[in-house]
Image (cartoon, rainbow, N blue to C red):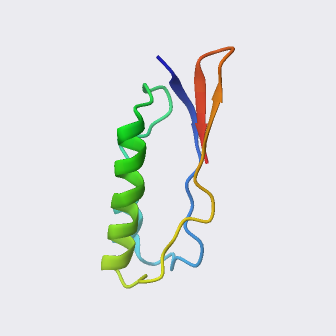
Amino acid sequence: PIIIEKVSLSVLNLKEENSKLQKKLKTPKLQEGKILHHIDYEDTKQNLLIVLQEHGYLNAKFITNEININQANYSASII
């Protein structure tokens, strides 16, 4: 299995005072040390867009969305 080594998710132009939204953007399926399942990655991307749109960020989109796999140590970085 491929283990998630790093997860780097950020939202540009997000109002910091929106703590409820910040909590919803945390993704329990994609955590460092967990096994990477591609369906969890795709679900997380979809759910993030839905949450952002529900909070008024109607033009939300991904600038970068990639998984870098290190085959030598069976790990992945999600950007």
Residue found at x 69% / y 14%: 72
Residue 40, quarter of picture: top left
Q: Does any portion of residue 8 appear in the rendered image?
A: yes
Residue 30, quarter of picture: top left
- Position of 63 with respect to 35 (left or right) is right
Residue 16 in percent (x, y) is at 51, 75
Q: Does any portion of residue 26 appear in the rendered image?
A: no
- Position of 15 with respect to 58 (left or right) is right
**How many numbered markers are drawn?**
0
Viewer-closest of 48 and 17:
48
Residue 29, quarter of picture: top left
Vertical side of 10 occupied by 40: above or below: above
Residue 50 in percent (x, y) is at 33, 69
Vertical side of 4 occupied by 56: above or below: below
Residue 47 in percent (x, y) is at 33, 59
Residue found at x 42% / y 56%: 45
Residue found at x 48% / y 26%: 33
Residue found at x 35% / y 40%: 39
Residue 66 in percent (x, y) is at 60, 47
